[in-house]
Amino acid sequence: MSMTERNHQELARLLDEARLGAREVSPLTRAHAELSLPDAYAIQAEGIRLRTARGERVVGLKMGLTSEAKRKQMNLDSPVYGVLTDRMQVPAGGVFKLQGTIHPKIEPEIAFRTARALRGRITREEALDACASAMAAMEILDSRYTDFKYFSLPDVVADNSSSSMFVLGATERPPRELDLARLNMSMEVNGAQVQSALSSAISGDPILSVVQLCELLAERGESLPAGSIVLAGAATAAHMLQPGDQVRLTVDGLGTLSVSVAQ
């Protein structure tokens, strides 16, 4: 039995209430084995509609499961996307509050800002031409599901691909000025390195995440607007956050950014 628009709305409300109430729910596929990937993106879109109706503004998109390390950690096999809103951004050097989250984790990323719209199947060169700048970034993930482990791809997508918050570095450079696939990335927590990788861990080359994103959007008849922030995906597995953590990411050519974690 296929899902209806009403099912999508009900499940979007369930996840929205879980997020607002900071409480876990069972993965949707436990009660809805028929949940498909197109259903999941419809639930995600409905969830974003609930948020924009409360005054949030969409500012970009994030790619998920772009690195082998991340796919292994989550036992999943292909990239997905989620939506970013203005209220999800934590200023660089700012404070992220754990209150209101369920099991938050942080991961090192590269982000892009688009200067013009992108649609359909595009080349790496077209993606580079359309991106005004690249910057270091960190994404804070938080799944609304019990255990945050081993759920299906449709479950992840319906839950806005486990999005919570994101931090962007202040240094922005044209992507062609960087050897994008060979940037050293090092994330420290309280002065100790917890994760490091080359940026090639992100889709083989972070700009290819933009190419993949446009393909995924095209499958749903959508495009990537000009002025979008795109988080290209994690270079490493995610690190669980604790109160009092000081997290710092350093990326070749893109400087350092940090965030403090409070209760």
Image (tube, rainbow, N blue to C red):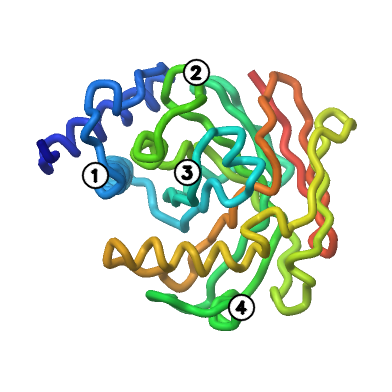
On screen, residue 221 above or below 121: above
| Circle nearer the N terminus (2, 4) | 4
| Circle nearer the N terminus (3, 1) | 1
Question: What's the amino acid at mark 4?
Answer: Leu
Disc 3 on helix, strand or loop? Answer: helix
Q: Nearer the viewer, mark 4 or mark 1?
A: 1
> Circle 1 is placed at which residue position?
39
| Circle nearer the N terminus (2, 3) | 3
> Circle 2 is placed at which residue position?
147
Which residue is nearer to you in this view: 89 or 192? 192
Left or right of residue 94, residue 126 in this image: left
Disc 1 on helix, strand or loop? Answer: helix
> Which of the numbered marks, if any, corresponds to residue 128?
4
The Cα–Cα distance between marks 1 and 2, rounded to whole angstroms, is: 23 Å
Q: In which quarter of the image is the N terminus?
A: top left
Residue at x-position 32% and y-position 29%: 15
The Cα–Cα distance between marks 3 and 4, rounded to whole angstroms, is: 27 Å
**Residue 206, percent across and down?**
65, 62
The Cα–Cα distance between marks 3 and 1, rounded to whole angstroms, is: 25 Å
Residue at x-position 60% and y-position 37%: 72
**Residue 132, percent across and down?**
61, 76
Q: Do the residues labelled 4 and 1 touch (CB within 8 Å)?
A: no
| Circle nearer the N terminus (3, 4) | 3
Question: What's the amino acid at mark 1?
Answer: Asp
**Residue 191, percent across and down?**
89, 32
Q: Are marks 2 and 3 in contact (CB under 8 Å)?
A: no
